[in-house]
Amino acid sequence: MKTDNPLHNQQTGKDGESLAASFLEKKGFKVLDRNFISGKYEIDLICEFKQYLVFVEVKARNNAKLEPEFAVNKAKQTHIARAAEGYMRFKKLNKEARFDIIAINHANGITEITHFADAFYPIYYK
């Protein structure tokens, strides 16, 4: 999806999360929470979609040379999974979890939003 909604340097993360939430809502997702923190770990967006509880990492960049989604490395995936476990315990939920990435890149006045559904399966490291 392309839009002409610009992202500003200082607000790139917050603006990206708002764009991602709106994008997902248009696709039928219900946004339950934003910026949930469990210990030292954070999840950008938590949504319901069909039978899934979807934990979404949003990566937004201005004029990125590398695709933003590549910033979600194995360590980041582990952190998201740990926060997801904390969320499910805190909310006493027992739903099937899914991990998505929303990559947002703003360059030359155009914002591109890419949704990677079921983007990763967390592996825990000691």
Image: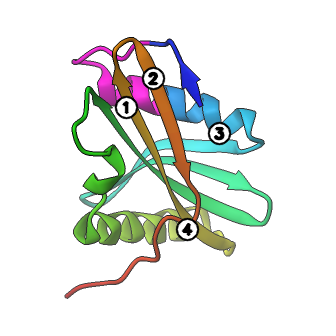
The amino acid sitting under disc 3 is Leu
> Which sits in the foreground, 74 or 33?
74
Q: Position of residue 119 (x, y in %)?
A: 49, 64
Gap in Å between the C-alphas at discs 4 and 2?
33 Å
Gap in Å between the C-alphas at discs 1 and 3?
16 Å
Identify residue for label 1: 105
Residue at horizontal 73%, vertical 33%? 26
Q: Nearer the viewer, mark 2 or mark 3?
A: 2
Task: Decide whether residue 115 is among the magenta residues.
Answer: no
Mark found first going from the N terminus, 4 or 2:
4
The amino acid sitting under disc 4 is Met
Gap in Å between the C-alphas at discs 2 and 3?
15 Å
Gap in Å between the C-alphas at discs 4 and 1?
30 Å
Residue at horizontal 25%, vertical 34%? 64
Q: Nearer the viewer, mark 1 or mark 3?
A: 1
Mark found first going from the N terminus, 1 or 3:
3
Mark found first going from the N terminus, 4 or 1:
4
Q: Position of residue 36 (x, y in %)?
A: 43, 48
| CB within 8 Å, label 1 to label 2 | yes
The secondary element bearing badge 3 is classed as: helix
Identify residue for label 2: 111
The secondary element bearing badge 4 is classed as: helix
